[in-house]
Image (cartoon, rainbow, N blue to C red):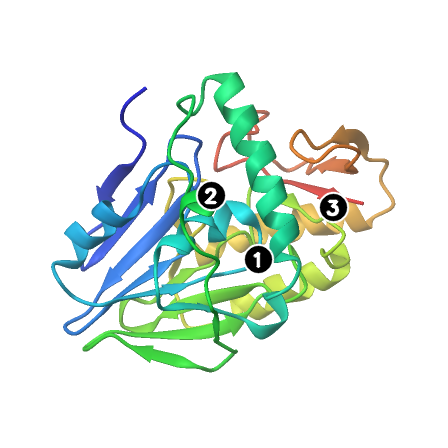
Amino acid sequence: MEKIFTVTDLGDGLWEIADCVGCRCYLVRGRDRVALVDSCVGVGDLRPVVHELAGGLPVTVLLTHRHHDHIAGSYLFDDVRIPREEDVNIALGEEQNEHAVRIYAEQGRAPEGAFSAMREGTRPSFTYFEEGDVLDLGGVTIEGVFLPGHTDHSMGYLVRERRLLLSGDAVTPCMCLFFPESLPIATWRQTLEKMQGLPFDTFRIGHYSHEFHKSDLDGFLAAADYALSGARGLSWMYTYIEGLKGSLYISPDTPTDDADSPDFRAVIGP
């Protein structure tokens, strides 16, 4: 396996960068600067890809939350920003990244002995980016908005001129709320309601190559309601952290049984 990154031009100064294990980050280019929202799992050197798209413009990395599959590539950049409350347990994430990358190689999803950003790079000296903060790229602005649930202070990034929300793992077809740092399902439901009131038409997430529309939030709300209804969940175990378990609630309204489909709707709670 030689090709680690796949770049998709989404138009209007927006690119999706996907790594070989399915993690995604997004590059937004303005007149004066580019923003990289999240940075993949750190398999392979992300810098040449980003710098080619940036065309010589300075790069600011905006992280949605602290999980290693979103922050690992940021170890290769200087200007890295994250919500203050997400700057915790970074060393634990480095350990989890080493374990996960080893499993990816065993599964054949990543090259054996591939470049590791967390190993070869440097832990960033984070600048904190809070809700309401705005990064001006020159003709394009990005605003932070808290979207708690997956983690306690997950952040989404509104690209107002594009009416686009880059939401990381704040909402996903198989929503993961089983981590120790995750918040209750009821709190995540409140985040979905908050999203309905935000000024965007479409949103993109960290692990699916798909353009979601605001109307898709109805299906996620239905999944949350099912999980909160007292229904019995299915036992579920996380592959990449030993001993971490959860309960899987598959929405009865989901149009597909394919968990890899962007149309799947489920919640994994504690």
Q: Earlier in the sequence, mark 1 or mark 2?
A: 1
> What is the distance, in whole Å, between disc 3 and disc 1 at their CAs?
15 Å
Q: Is residue 186 above or below residue 199?
A: above
Check disc 1 and give the amino acid type: Arg
Check disc 2 and give the amino acid type: Arg
Q: Is label 1 in contact with label 2 (beta carbons under 8 Å)?
A: no
Tell me, for residue 178, which label it has, or none.
Answer: 3
Which residue is at a point 43% across and 21% down the rendered structure image?
A: 112
Q: Mark 3 packing: few (<14 Cα in 10 Å), some, or many (20+)? A: many
Check disc 3 and give the amino acid type: Phe
Q: Nearer the viewer, residue 124 or 233?
A: 124
Q: At numbered mark 2, what does the secondary structure look like: helix, strand or loop?
A: helix
Q: Earlier in the sequence, mark 3 or mark 1?
A: 1
Please give left or right for residue 12 compared with residue 42 in the image: left
Which residue is at a point 31% across and 45% down the rendered structure image?
A: 46
Q: Earlier in the sequence, mark 3 or mark 2?
A: 2
Q: Is residue 27 visible?
A: yes
Residue marked by disc 2: 119
Please give left or right for residue 40 compared with residue 99 in the image: left
Q: On the rendered image, what quadrant is the N terminus found in? A: top left
Q: Is residue 1 above or below residue 223?
A: above
Q: Nearer the viewer, mark 1 or mark 2?
A: 2
**Percent coordinates x, y for residue 94 in the rendering:** 58, 47
Residue marked by disc 1: 66
> What is the distance, in whole Å, between disc 1 and disc 2 at their CAs?
17 Å
Q: At numbered mark 1, what does the secondary structure look like: helix, strand or loop?
A: loop
Q: Nearer the viewer, mark 3 or mark 2?
A: 2
**Percent coordinates x, y for residue 138 in the rendering:** 19, 77
